[in-house]
C-alpha cells in the first residue's frame, strides 16, 4: 500500500495547482514565523532595521511578482498552444509536467502571496519591533529565491517549446518508462499469458466508463487480493482502450471487484509513465506532422525515426532480462507486447512518408537493424514492418529511378551490414 500511496502522491505533486498551493502555504508560514522568532532575538537589533525599509521591499516585491507572474503565464499558454498546433496536441500534455516551469510559477505566486500577507499584517499591530527584524531577513531570503528562479526561467525560455526540447523530453520519459517495464515487465505482477488457465468460477469486472487504461496500481490490488486470499486477473493492459461495460478484469472473490475499479485508472488519454508505447506514438505523430506539405521537413522525420529506434533498442530480450520473482503474486497482468510498439509508430511514418525516398531509406536501415535484435518477437515485428513499408513505398514512389534507388539501397544495406542480401519486393510494372 505504501507503494501505491507514493505513486498517487507523485501524480498530485506533478500538477501545477498543487505546487502553487503548497508554496503559497509555505509563504504564509514564513510570515507567521517572523512573529514566532521575533521574541527570541536579543534586544537592540530592532534599531538596525527600520519598518520603512521593510515596507518598501514588500511593496516592490508584491508589484513586481504580480507582473512577472502574469507575463510568465501568458508565455506558458502561448508556448503550449504553439506545441499543440505545430507538433501534436499529445505533446502538450507532456509539456504540462515540465518541472522547471511549474516550480518557477509556483515561486512567483508564493512570493506575491508572501508580500501581500506581510503588507496586510504590517498595516495592523501584529508585528512588534523585533518581529520586523525577522520579517526583513525573511524578505531578503525571498528576494534571493526570486532572483534565482528568474535566472532559471530565463535559461528555460531559451529552448522552451522548441522541437529539440519537446522531442528530447518525450524521448527521455519514454526511455525511463521502458526501463521500468523491463525491470518489471508486468508491473511486478504475474504474467497473464495465453497459456494461463483461469478458474471457471471467476467474477467479471466491467469498465464503469469508456477510455484508456492510464495506469494500474498493482501494489494496492495485490494487497486487497492477499487480504482475502483471492486472485485478480486484469485482462486489459496499460494503454488499451476499453468501452463502458467491457470486461477489464476477473476476480476470484466478489470483494476484489471494488479494489480493481479503484486501482485501475481509466482516463481520456494515454500516459507515458506505465505506457511507453504512447511516447513512441507521440514521436511518430511529430514525424508525420513534419511530412505534411505545409511543413515538408524531412530532417525532423529522420530525427523522430532515430529517436524511436533508440528507444526500441533498449528492449531487453528474454535471455537478457534479469530473472525476478513477482512482487505481487495475487495479481496477473498482460505483458508488454513488442509487436505494436514497432508496427504502430513506424507504420504511421511509413504510410505518410511512402513517397519520400530519403525517409524510406532511413526507415529501411533502422528497421533492418531492429530486425537483428536479440528478442525474436521484436525482430519479427521489425521484419514485417520493414517489408510492409518497402512494399508501400514501391507502389507510392512516383518515379522509377526512385524505386530502383530504394531497391539498390536495401540490397546494399543487407550485404554491407549483415553479410546477406535483404529481400526486396518486386518493382511495380
Image (cartoon, rainbow, N blue to C red):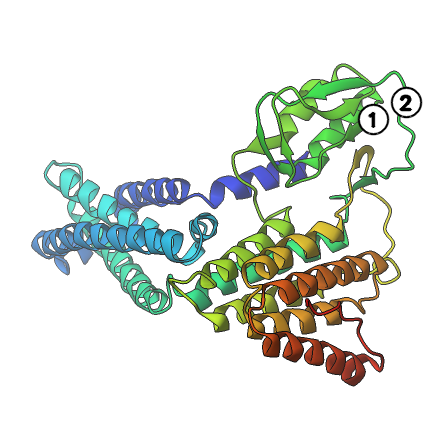
Crowdedness of circle 2 by 10 Å Cα count: few (<14), some, many (20+)? Answer: few
Left or right of 110? Residue 260 is right
Q: Is residue 374 above or below residue 111?
A: below
- The residue depicted at 75 percent of the width and 52 percent of the height is 339
Mark closer to the observer (1, 2): 2
* Mark 1: secondary structure: loop
In the image as oriented, which residue stretches furthest toward the left? 52
Residue at x-position 69% and y-position 74% = 365
The single residue placed furthest to the bottom in the displayed view is 416
In the picture of the structure, the residue carrying the numbered disc 2 is 199
- Residue 223, percent across and down? 75, 29
Above or below residue 57? Residue 373 is below
Q: Is 238 or 240 nearer to us in this picture?
A: 240
Q: Is residue 226 visible?
A: yes
The reply, left or right, for residue 156 in relation to residue 305 is: left
Q: In terms of secondary structure, where does tag 2 sit?
A: loop
Q: Are marks 1 and 2 in contact (CB under 8 Å)?
A: yes
Instruction: Return the residue at label 1.
Output: 231
Name the image quarter holding the C terminus.
bottom right
Distance from Cα at disc 1 to Cα at disc 2: 10 Å
| Location of residue 249 in the rendering, given as x and y in whole percent from the top left corner | 74, 26
Q: Quadrant of the N terminus?
A: top right
- In the rendered view, does 123 fall on the left or right side of 271? left
41 or 117: which is nearer to us? 117
Query: In the drawing, does residue 23 fall left or right of residue 55?
Result: right
Q: How many numbered discs sit on the rendered protein?
A: 2
Amino acid at each position: 500500500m505504501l507503494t501505491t500511496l507514493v505513486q498517487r502522491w507523485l501524480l498530485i505533486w506533478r500538477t501545477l495547482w498543487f505546487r502553487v498551493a503548497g508554496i503559497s502555504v509555505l509563504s504564509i508560514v514564513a510570515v507567521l514565523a517572523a512573529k514566532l522568532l521575533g521574541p527570541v532575538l536579543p534586544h537592540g537589533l530592532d534599531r538596525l532595521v527600520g519598518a520603512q525599509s521593510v515596507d518598501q521591499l514588500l511593496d516592490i516585491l508584491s508589484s513586481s511578482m504580480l507582473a512577472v507572474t502574469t507575463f510568465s503565464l501568458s508565455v506558458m499558454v502561448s508556448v503550449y498552444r504553439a506545441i499543440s498546433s505545430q507538433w501534436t496536441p499529445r505533446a502538450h500534455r507532456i509539456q504540462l509536467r515540465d518541472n522547471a516551469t511549474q516550480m518557477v510559477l509556483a515561486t512567483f505566486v508564493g512570493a506575491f502571496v508572501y508580500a501581500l500577507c506581510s503588507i496586510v499584517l504590517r498595516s495592523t499591530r501584529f508585528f512588534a519591533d523585533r518581529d520586523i527584524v525577522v520579517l526583513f531577513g525573511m524578505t531578503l531570503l525571498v528576494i534571493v529565491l526570486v532572483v534565482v528562479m528568474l535566472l532559471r526561467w530565463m535559461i528555460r525560455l531559451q529552448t522552451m517549446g522548441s522541437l529539440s526540447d519537446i522531442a528530447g523530453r518525450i524521448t527521455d520519459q519514454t526511455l525511463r518508462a521502458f526501463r521500468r517495464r523491463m525491470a518489471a515487465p508486468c508491473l511486478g505482477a504475474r504474467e497473464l499469458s495465453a497459456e494461463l488457465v483461469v478458474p471457471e468460477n471467476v467474477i467479471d469486472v466491467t469498465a464503469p466508463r469508456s477510455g484508456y487504461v492510464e495506469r494500474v496500481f498493482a501494489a494496492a490490488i495485490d494487497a486487497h487480493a492477499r487480504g482475502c486470499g483471492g486472485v485478480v486477473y486484469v485482462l486489459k493492459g496499460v494503454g488499451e482502450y476499453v468501452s463502458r461495460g467491457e470486461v477489464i478484469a476477473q476476480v476470484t472473490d466478489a470483494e476484489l471487484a471494488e479494489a480493481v475499479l479503484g486501482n485501475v485508472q481509466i482516463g481520456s488519454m494515454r500516459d507515458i509513465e506505465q505506457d511507453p508505447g504512447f511516447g513512441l506514438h507521440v514521436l511518430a505523430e511529430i514525424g508525420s506532422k513534419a511530412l505534411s506539405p505545409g511543413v515538408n521537413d524531412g530532417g525532423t522525420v529522420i530525427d523522430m525515426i532515430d529517436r524511436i529506434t533508440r528507444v526500441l533498442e533498449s528492449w531487453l530480450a528474454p535471455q537478457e532480462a534479469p530473472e525476478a520473482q513477482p512482487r505481487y503474486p495475487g495479481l496477473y497482468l498482460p505483458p508488454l507486447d513488442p509487436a505494436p510498439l514497432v508496427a504502430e509508430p513506424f507504420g504511421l511514418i511509413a504510410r505518410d512518408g511512402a513517397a519520400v525516398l530519403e525517409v524510406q531509406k532511413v526507415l529501411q536501415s533502422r528497421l533492418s537493424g531492429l530486425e537483428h535484435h536479440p528478442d525474436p518477437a521484436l525482430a519479427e515485428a521489425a521484419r514485417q514492418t520493414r517489408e510492409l513499408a518497402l512494399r508501400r513505398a514501391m507502389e507510392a514512389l512516383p518515379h522509377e529511378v526512385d524505386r530502383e534507388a530504394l531497391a539498390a539501397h536495401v540490397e546494399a544495406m543487407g550485404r554491407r551490414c549483415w553479410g546477406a542480401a535483404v529481400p526486396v519486393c518486386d518493382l511495380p510494372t
